[in-house]
Structures are given as C-alpha cells and as structure tokens.
Amino acid sequence: MATTTETLAIVSGDDVVRVRQKVRVRATEAGLSLVDQTKLITAASELARNTLDYGKGGHADIMTVNDTARRGVRIVFRDQGPGIPDVALALTDGFTSGNGLGHGLGGARRLVDDFDIQTAVGQGTTVTIARWRK
C-alpha cells in the first residue's frame, strides 16, 4: 500500500482553514469526484474545528491511500482534550456540549465512507475518517 502522510497542527482558526485546504488538494489528487471532495472537506472542517474548540488543539494526519483495493483520503484527528463522556449522545443530531448547532460528529459521520472514534475521559479523542474513490 502506498501512503503519503502530512501532519498539520491545529492550534488556531487559521489551522482549521489549512486543514481544509490540504484535504481539498489530497482529495483532488486521489481522484475523488467533486461531490465526494465537498463531503470530505466539510467533514474534515467540522472535525478540525472540534479538535480546536473541544479538544483544546491537536493535529491532523492527512493521508492519500493508494492500494490495490482502493484509492482515497484518510484523515486522523487527535487531541489530548477532556475526551467525550458519552459518544452515542455526542453522535446524536442536535446534541452540543458548547454553542454549536449539534451537527458536528453525526454530520461528519454521514459525509464519509469510514468513521471511527476512540476517546477516553481525561485522555483525549482520536477520530479517523476516510472517503474512497468510487
């Protein structure tokens, strides 16, 4: 499997924009359709914002994955924030622990092909997403 990874820090609003821009470049390089690019960029933007706002900063590993079975983009968001006490509740539409609209995690999950969340209270959260070329 050929994979190239770039790690971007997420410590300010400007970094959220940089993540979005890099995901756009990677999605284009991977040959994703315009619709799939838009879905991936939207999900990545939301998760980068969550990493900043709720995780108190972290980083994103953006990977172009190209193997014999599929080609696409995988992104891993990591923070060392407070963690998510109830993942099922956090994935529920309308739930927010802050001032948001409550579409973040659940909305991001619907926009991608693969979605995984690992979290522990007091230890942070890792969210992995992927969108594959059809």
Image: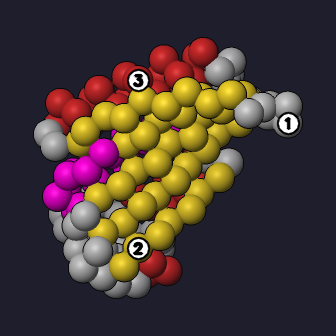
The answer to whether residue 36 is visible is no
Q: Which residue is mark 2?
A: 119
Q: Are marks 3 and 1 in contact (CB under 8 Å)?
A: no
Label 1, secondary structure: give it. Answer: loop
Lower position in the chain sequence, tag 1 or tag 2: 1
Seen at 50% across and 42% down, the residue is: 75
Q: Are marks 1 and 2 in contact (CB under 8 Å)?
A: no
Camera-side mark, 3 or 1: 1
What residue type is disc 1 on? Ala
Q: Position of residue 129 (x, y in %)?
A: 55, 49
Please tell me which residue is depicted at 37% across the width and 22% down the height of the picture.
21
Quarter containing the N terminus: top right
Q: Earlier in the sequence, mark 3 or mark 1?
A: 3
Q: Mark number for residue 69?
A: 1
Q: Which residues are magenta?
A: 40-59
Q: Secondary structure at mark 2?
A: strand
133 vs 45, left or right, is right
Which disc number belongs to residue 90?
Answer: none
On the image, the x and y values in percent for residue 34 come to 62, 21
Above/below status of 57 relative to 70: below
For the stretch drawn in magenta, the main secondary structure is: helix
Task: Answer whether residue 8 is visible to the viewer in this image.
Answer: yes
3 or 2: tag closer to the N-terminus = 3
Quadrant of the frame with the C terminus: top right
Q: Residues within 10 Å of mark 2 (few under 14, many from 20)?
A: many
Residue type highlighted by circle 2: Thr
Q: Which residue is mark 3?
A: 22
Q: CA distance from mark 3 to mark 1?
A: 24 Å
Front residue (pair 31, 1): 1
Crowding at dot 3, Cα within 10 Å, few <14 / some 14-19 / many 20+, comes out as: some
Residue 49 shown in magenta: yes
Q: Amino acid at mark 3?
A: Lys
